[in-house]
Image (spheres, grey):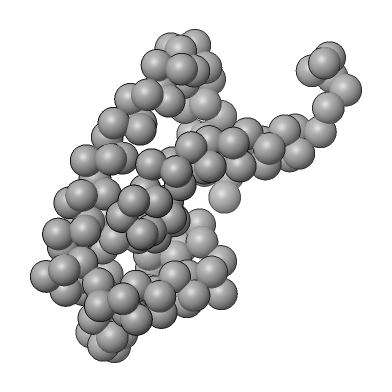
Amino acid sequence: MDADNYCIAGRLRMLARIVTSRYNEAFAPLGVTLAQAGLLMNIFARPGVRQAQLGKLLQIEKSAMNRDVQLLQKNGWLTDNLRNGLYLTSEGTVLAKQCHKIWKVMNQTVRDDLGQDAVGGLTILSEKLIAKS
């Protein structure tokens, strides 16, 4: 397909779905999605982070953030005292560490599959778009 004739937004969404699906398959044995694993790992790295602050940092819509936070709380992985920020329970901490191991393997696999040029291009693209947001 000619690069001048496809919708960039549509192509990025399609690629995101493909890559997200691969990560979701890897996280499935732990009972979480990529989005939920990402929240667990980020809360592990930033204990006490406010939900709104984390949503802004990760560019997650408020409704999606609320849904995943509630699910993490329901499963006993996240405390439910949102006024004091988000904290993992001991079970959530164990799960976040397991997620990080899977994430490292998947990240390297996808990097290897894409190759250095594609990863470099993605880095440039993301830096430009993030700077403008």
Q: Position of residue 3 (x, y in %)?
A: 79, 18
Q: From this viewpoint, which residue is outermost toward the front? A: 29
Dividing the picture into quarters, in which one does residue 7 lie?
top right
Dividing the picture into quarters, in which one does residue 5 lie?
top right
Residue ID at (20%, 49%)? 98
- 27 vs 116: above or below: below
* Along the viewing direction, whichever of 53 and 17 lies nearer the viewer: 17
- Looking at the figure, which quarter contains the N terminus? top right
- 121 vs 59: above or below: above
Q: Position of residue 84 (x, y in %)?
A: 23, 84
Dividing the picture into quarters, in which one does residue 58 lie?
bottom left
Q: From this viewpoint, which residue is outermost toward the left? A: 90
Q: Position of residue 24 (x, y in %)?
A: 45, 47
Residue ID at (46%, 13%)? 115
Residue ID at (54%, 69%)? 64
- 78 vs 26: above or below: below
How many numbered marks are there?
0
Residue ID at (36%, 59%)? 31
Q: Tell me if I can see residue 128 in this picture.
A: no
Q: Is residue 63 left or right of residue 102?
A: right
Q: Is residue 68 left or right of residue 87?
A: right
Q: From this viewpoint, which residue is outermost toward the right? A: 5
Q: Position of residue 18 (x, y in %)?
A: 59, 36
Q: Tell me if I can see residue 100 in this picture.
A: yes
